[in-house]
Amino acid sequence: MKLKIQNGQEYIFDLVRKKFVLNQPEEWVRQNFIKFLNEKKGYPLSLMSVEKKTNINLRQKRCDIICFDKNNQALLLVECKAQNIKLNQETINQSVIYQKKIKAQFIIITNGNQTYCFKEDNTKIEFIKKIPHYSLIE
């Protein structure tokens, strides 16, 4: 990861937004997961969105990462948490609320230490053992 220090603060390079952003614990997880999705799972950086603003229940929220297919349909909705945050039902619920608006094929939650992937099927959420490779779901 590209890092730099500016005015006494550390910044990390965001591969999607193509700029340095303040390196906070959740941002570190987000940037490393973007790199993982791109390099190991084949998701093109050009088809990713980071901190996309979305109106949910009349409130503006930001989705951490959304990966799209070539037709601009959401494939993955990724919710990132800092490494010290436990992934629990509350984290899943937050992602499911976002999912109602985004309608991605898969939901992922990660804190960098643990990662869970889910697929929503007719309002039923089922656990998936592996994050699918881009070439298998595009």
Image: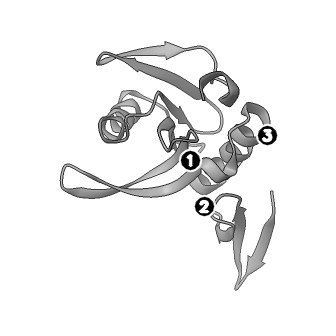
In three-dimensional space, the C-alpha distance between marks 3 and 2, rounded to whole angstroms, equals 22 Å
Q: Residue 14 location in percent, x, y?
A: 68, 61
In three-dimensional space, the C-alpha distance between marks 2 and 1, rounded to whole angstroms, equals 8 Å
Category of crowding for the residue at label 1, using alpha-carbon neighbours closer than 10 angstroms: few (below 14), some (14–19), many (at least 20): some
Position of the N terminus by quadrant = bottom right
Frontmost residue, 103 versus 14: 103
Q: Residue 43 location in percent, x, y?
A: 68, 39
The residue wearing badge 2 is: 24
Position of the C terminus by quadrant = top right
At 36% from the left edge and 36% from the top edge, which residue is drawn? 99
Which mark identifies residue 39? 3
Extreme residue toward the bottom, this view: 7
Left or right, 107 with reference to 82 = left
Q: Is 1 rendered above or below residue 100?
A: below
Category of crowding for the residue at label 3, using alpha-carbon neighbours closer than 10 angstroms: few (below 14), some (14–19), many (at least 20): few
At 59% from the left edge and 49% from the top edge, which residue is drawn? 48
Which mark identifies residue 138? none
Q: Quadrant of residue 4?
A: bottom right
Compare marks 3 and 2 and give the one earlier in the sequence.
2
In three-dimensional space, the C-alpha distance between marks 1 and 3, rounded to whole angstroms, equals 21 Å
Left or right, 138 with reference to 92 = right
Mark 2 in CB contact with mark 1 (< 8 angstroms): yes
Which mark identifies residue 82? 1
Q: Residue 65 location in percent, x, y?
A: 53, 47
What's under tag 1, amino acid-wise? Ala
What's under tag 3, amino acid-wise? Glu
Frontmost residue, 10 versus 74: 74
What's under tag 2, amino acid-wise? Gln
Q: Secondary structure at mark 1?
A: loop
Q: Secondary structure at mark 2?
A: loop
